[in-house]
Structures are given as C-alpha cells and as structure tokens.
C-alpha cells in the first residue's frame, strides 16, 4: 500500500499561481528617467521577476516572485544548444485615468502554449500565466510605471526554456518558466513612415512545414543579418517574401497590411497574409485590427486574408490603386509604411493628407490606443489591481 505522500510524488504538479512565494528585493533600484530608459545597451528591467521550474516527474514548482537577476543553468542545458526556447511579448499601458491595463493577454497565453508544444516544452496554463503577470505588475507597476506617466508602457516577456543538462537531442525533462518586464523604446512614431527593404533572394524567415507561426527564439537570431543590411541602407525593417512569386508575409517582427483598390471592380480592400499555411505569427494586434475593421468599417472596406505578392503591390502602386500600408504588433503598435524597396525598385505609398499616415492606419491606431490607454471602456483591456506602497 502506498502512502499519501508517495501518491503525491507520483503526480506531476500543475503550475499554481496561488502558491506564489514573495521574496522582495532588499535593494530596489532607481527608476531611470523616461528619456534615458531605453538609451543604453542593456534592457532595464524592473526590480522583480517571476520564476517557476518544471520537471517531468514532479511537475511545476511553486512559482516565486523574486529580485530580477541572473539565472543558473548548466552549460549543457538544451535551450543553449537546441533552441528549446519560446517567449511572448505584451505590454502594460498606463492610462489617462492613472490605471494600468493589459490587452487581450489570453491570446498571448494561448500562443505561448502553442509555441511550447512546437518545441516539446511543457505548457504553461493560460489562467496561471495571466495571474502571474498580474502579480508581477501589482508589485512593480506603481514604481516602474507611475500613475503620472499616462501614455507610457512596460514591456512584459514571459519565457520558457528547456534546462535539461543533456547533449542528446530530445524533449527536455526539465524546464524553466519566467516573466521579466522592462523598458523598450517607442518605435511607432517613425517620421515620414516606415521604410521596408524586401528580403534577399537567398533568405527566408519561415517556410511551409516550419515554425514561423510560433514565437520561438530560433526564428529571430538568424533574421538579424538581413535586418542589419536593411538598416545599413537606411531601412527600418525587412519585408519578408516567400516563394517563387514573392508573397508578402511579415515586416520584421510585425504583421504587414496593405489597403488598395482591388484590380477590376475597384473595391477598397484591406489585405494581409493568411494564417493557414503557418508562415506568419498570429499576432494579437493583427487579429484586433481585423476585428475592428470588420466591426467598424465593414461597409466600405473589404477584408481579405490571402496570399499576395510584391508584384501585385508594385502593380497597384503603378496604377495608383495602392492607398496605404502599415505594419502592426505589440512592439511596433500600428506604424505606417511609406516606402518599400524591392530589388532596387522603389514603391512609394501614400501617407494621407497630412503626410503622417493613411486613413485606415490612423483610425486603427486611434481606436487601439483608446482601448489600451483607457480612453474608452472595452472588453479587450483589463485593469491591473496594483499594490500601493
Ligand atoms: C510577436 C510577433 C508579431 C506581432 O504579434 P503581436 O501579438 O501583435 O505582438 C508579428 N510577427 C512576428 C514574427 C512576431 O514575432
């Protein structure tokens, strides 16, 4: 007969946010002034982080909220060799009413599960993830994003890594989940709009059957070489093309849209790459833009998720049918695209009457900003309840 404790040991424990153990920082750090918070080479993170470990036999440890600091993992840990690493990116927004809000976090949580599954890591329960993000924001939000900084944000990075110290390529039997947060620069205000350079012929970001749809670290490191080249030539991001026909997929780490008058019937159409071939990330911002346009501009603007090629964009521009273009994501928010260079050919994209952005781009940016910063009440934004010192 087995004792109760034997039975417990045999059952891997689920992640349980209610067991969170608090160890607060002894020497909290100074908050940088907003002007310099993103100026250095190192991302400035808040005082604390959340961390839980997992093993295939015991399951999840009780999560800890503890001072931000180095991790201890073995040099043979699988994340360091076989890219068993995935992450999420979301923001907390300080509203005009002084409240802190998160935006549709359940979608980030679901996507993290998908990413974990794709690289054989244990999944993090969506509700527990959400509770743990709230717990971290409750502690560090008031200090690191004070009430008087309406319109500012903190970037939140939940991460899962395989930590099993074994050089065999296999599903990790131990892993770590952590959440850090810190400052990232505001990049959506690009004077004159964003300039994109199409990806070189000999490089792809993702491929059918690959993992471009997952937020796994393995997608990002290898893309930097192309971005560096773009940056040297004065462009902000790479427009990643795919296949013989040059299908437009994503702009760097953001989802890419065009608004044009459709060839033939001249219907005004919002076009973006589809999700079904799993080449692109199912962005929360992408989804939100599509839903808002469907709800609020449905009468005038048709929405089409389909493959579209760079030659279609060139043709639309040449025929005066290209109306606007923008790129969206948590990092880039909604940023107008004014210029695309493809194999030395320059596509100029209209930027609206004031030269700042097109009409649809401006509306989406305004609507989403209002939701995120509490200008309007909306079910997509959730207020964080903060611990006041
Ligand atoms: C994260 C990411 C996006 C944007 O997704 P959001 O959920 O809107 O932040 C788009 N493309 C890639 C490749 C990404 O990594």
Image (cartoon, helix red, strand yellow):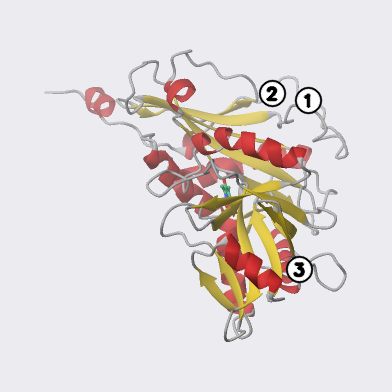
Left or right: 79 in relation to 238: left
Answer with mark 3 or mark 1, whichever residue precedes in sequence: 1
Q: Determine whether the beta carbon of the residue marked 3 sits less than 8 angstroms from the nearest atom of ligand 1.
A: no
Place of residue 279 in the rendered image (x, y in percent of width and height, measured from the top left): 47, 52
Cα–Cα gap, marks 3 and 1 = 38 Å
Left or right: 294 in relation to 236: left
Number of marks? 3
Marks 2 & 1, CB-CB < 8 Å contact: yes
The residue at which mark 3 appears reads as 362
Place of residue 349 in the rendered image (x, y in percent of width and height, measured from the top left): 75, 65
Cα–Cα gap, marks 3 and 2 = 42 Å
Query: Going by the picture, which residue comes out furthest to the top?
Result: 75
Q: Nearer the viewer, mark 3 or mark 1?
A: 3
The residue at which mark 2 appears reads as 25
Marks 3 & 1, CB-CB < 8 Å contact: no
The residue at which mark 1 appears reads as 29
* Residue 386: quadrant of the picture: top right
What residue is rendered at 65% in x and 57% in y? 328
Q: Dot 2: few (<14), some (14–19), or many (≥20) neighbours within 10 Å?
A: few
Q: Dot 1: few (<14), some (14–19), or many (≥20) neighbours within 10 Å?
A: few
């Amino acid at each position: 007969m087995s004792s109760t404790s034997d039975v417990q040991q045999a059952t891997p424990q689920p992640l349980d946010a209610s067991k969170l153990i608090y160890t607060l920082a002894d020497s909290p750090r100074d908050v940088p002034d907003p002007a310099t918070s993103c100026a250095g080479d190192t991302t400035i993170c808040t005082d604390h982080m959340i961390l839980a470990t997992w093993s295939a036999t015991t399951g999840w440890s009780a999560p800890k909220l503890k001072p931000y600091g180095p991790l201890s993992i073995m040099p043979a840990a699988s994340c360091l060799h076989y890219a068993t690493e995935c992450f999420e990116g979301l923001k907390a927004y300080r509203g005009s009413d002084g409240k802190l809000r998160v935006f549709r976090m359940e979608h980030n949580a679901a996507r993290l599960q998908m990413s974990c599954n794709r690289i054989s890591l244990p999944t993090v329960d969506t509700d527990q993830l959400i509770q743990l993000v709230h717990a971290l924001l409750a502690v560090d939000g008031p200090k690191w994003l004070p009430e008087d900084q309406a319109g500012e944000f903190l970037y939140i990075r939940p991460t899962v890594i395989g930590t099993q110290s074994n050089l065999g390529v296999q599903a990790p039997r131990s892993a770590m989940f952590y959440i850090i947060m810190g400052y990232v620069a505001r990049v959506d205000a690009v004077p004159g709009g964003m300039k994109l350079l199409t990806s070189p012929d000999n490089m792809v970001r993702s491929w059918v059957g690959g993992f471009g749809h997952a937020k796994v670290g393995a997608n990002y490191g290898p893309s930097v070489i192309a971005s560096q080249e773009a940056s040297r030539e004065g462009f902000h991001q790479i427009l990643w093309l795919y296949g013989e026909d040059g299908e437009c997929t994503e702009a760097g780490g953001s989802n890419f849209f065009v608004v044009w008058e459709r060839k033939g019937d001249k219907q005004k159409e919002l076009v973006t790459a589809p999700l079904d071939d799993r080449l692109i990330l199912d962005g929360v911002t992408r989804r939100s833009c599509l839903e808002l346009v469907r709800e609020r501009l449905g009468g005038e603007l048709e929405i089409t998720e389909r493959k579209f090629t760079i030659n279609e964009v060139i043709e639309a521009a040449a025929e005066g049918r290209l109306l606007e273009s923008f790129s969206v994501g948590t990092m880039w928010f909604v940023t107008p695209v004014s210029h695309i260079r493809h194999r030395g050919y320059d596509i100029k994209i209209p930027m609206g009457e004031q030269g700042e952005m097109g009409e649809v781009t401006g509306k989406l940016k305004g609507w989403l900003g209002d939701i995120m910063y509490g200008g309007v009440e909306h079910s997509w934004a959730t207020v964080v309840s903060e611990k006041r010192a």
